[in-house]
Amino acid sequence: MSKSKNTEQKIFDAATELFLEKGVDRTSVREIAAKAGINLALMNYYFRSKENLFGSIFSMLVQKNSEELIRILDSDMELFEKIRQYVGVYIDMLSENPLLVSFVMSILHRSRERITEMKVISSLYSTDQFTRQILDEGKKGNIRRTDPTQIFVDMLSLIAFPFAIKMLVIDKNNFTEEEFGEFILERKKRIPELLIESLRPPR
Amino acid sequence: MSKSKNTEQKIFDAATELFLEKGVDRTSVREIAAKAGINLALMNYYFRSKENLFGSIFSMLVQKNSEELIRILDSDMELFEKIRQYVGVYIDMLSENPLLVSFVMSILHRSRERITEMKVISSLYSTDQFTRQILDEGKKGNIRRTDPTQIFVDMLSLIAFPFAIKMLVIDKNNFTEEEFGEFILERKKRIPELLIESLRPPR
DNA sequence: TAAAGTTTTAAACGGTGTTTTAAACGGTCT
DNA sequence: AGACCGTTTAAAACACCGTTTAAAACTTTA
């Protein structure tokens, strides 16, 4: 019992690390077994297949990382404050796990047709409450009337994409790992300003 | 001679399509051969290896798609007009080849350490002329003083990322392919406005 | 037209990745 | 004690994969 929970977890952890690091396709089950220090066949015993294992890991990752974000979007915070919080929390989250973006995107590319995974990721997407809020504030004249989807895509793009091209940015600017961190930190202030500026009603 | 150029091209084209569609790792050389309608061994005859074939295709794609963009950045156009043009041309380009973003990003993730490919992609990145222009205009007080890298990353993010999450956007909003096209078209106006707004000197 | 060069073919090689099988292990219960 | 259970092991089966080979089929050239 205790032993089994242990090896199952060991497999899970090793696989998670490897999948994030090298991508699903480029990590073999032998590698996972080696890293977890377990017998090859146990991977099949606990998870039925590599694909299945991947599925478990994927939904765990998405759920773990999207909960707080959704809570922010669903709260009744003032809009601009909400944007500031969302951006800040999201960037912190990705800073702690910078490989997440590339990973999710590779999954998106991998299973463009399979809707199953799409649904899972959607939870990381906008919420009705946030959409309504933008429409309402627009009607009230507090902000420029804007398509909520556009705003959300702007926000997501500005937050996530830099992590996906991290190595490019580092290479181009001769950044150290640390300097990239500062670059990202700067964006925590910059992105909300940029978004809010674009929402302010025209003078 | 004529025949050889033909099969070489057939291999190249088939592989290009498959690599973009399914990613390099998930397409086998047998698949390429089948799609090209040629014998398996010819892939090794013309290109020495799969990796080599991939290299050729990759640099072709990058070169083909970055030329015009670099020309715009390097021109002596007025800054805001330059941004408008760059965004417009880039979005048009990606609209024609929507898989390009995911592909490049998967490569970035694939070879995070190998600098070779990084250098190639860097060509698609900012240019000195553009950087200088932003610094100059900042000094002159024509625009807000801003880190050029931040601006460029903003621009790239807003342009490219939506294509990477295309299926997510479609799924979430119940878009048709066509509606997604309109959504992107809207961004051609929106992104330059957003960027330019953020650059205008404070009142 | 025969020799030389180029292109194409079918088959096979060595390797790796995934899954299955059957036996062994170590507790627990009767 | 022996039978039983979930767990673990080692081995092998199976399916591909990228690459190589050696010979056949063609072009070209002389």
Image (tube, coloured by chain):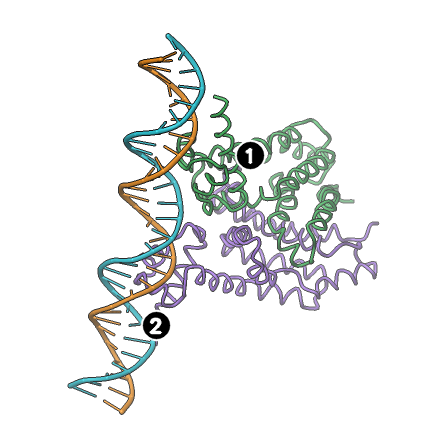
Chain colours: A purple, B green, C orange, D cyan
* Coordinates of residue A192 in the picture (x, y in percent): 67, 53
At x 43%, y 42%, the residue is B30
In the image, A133 versus B176, the foreground residue is: B176
Q: In this rendering, would A132 be left or right of C17?
A: right
- Quickly name the residue at label 2: A4
Same-subunit check for callouts 1 and 2? no
At x 71%, y 43%, the residue is B195
- Quickly name the residue at label 1: B62
Q: In this rendering, would B38 be left or right of A108?
A: left
Q: Is residue A19 above or below residue B190?
A: below
Q: Chain of mark 1?
A: B
In the image, A164 versus B92, the foreground residue is: B92
* Coordinates of residue B64 in the picture (x, y in percent): 58, 31
Quadrant in the rendering for residue B91: top right
**Kind of residue at disc 2:** Ser
Q: Chain of mark 2?
A: A
**Kind of residue at disc 1:** Val
In the image, B58 versus A149, the foreground residue is: B58
Label 2 crowd bin: few (<14), some (14–19), many (20+), radius 10 Å: few
Helix, strand or loop at label 2? It is: helix
* Coordinates of residue B44 in the picture (x, y in percent): 40, 33
Q: In this rendering, would A33 be left or right of D26?
A: left
At x 79%, y 63%, the residue is A136
Q: Is residue A42 above or below residue D14?
A: below
How many numbered discs?
2
Helix, strand or loop at label 1? It is: helix
* Coordinates of residue B13 in the picture (x, y in percent): 53, 35
Quadrant in the rendering for residue A89: bottom right
Q: Is residue A56 above or below residue A106?
A: below
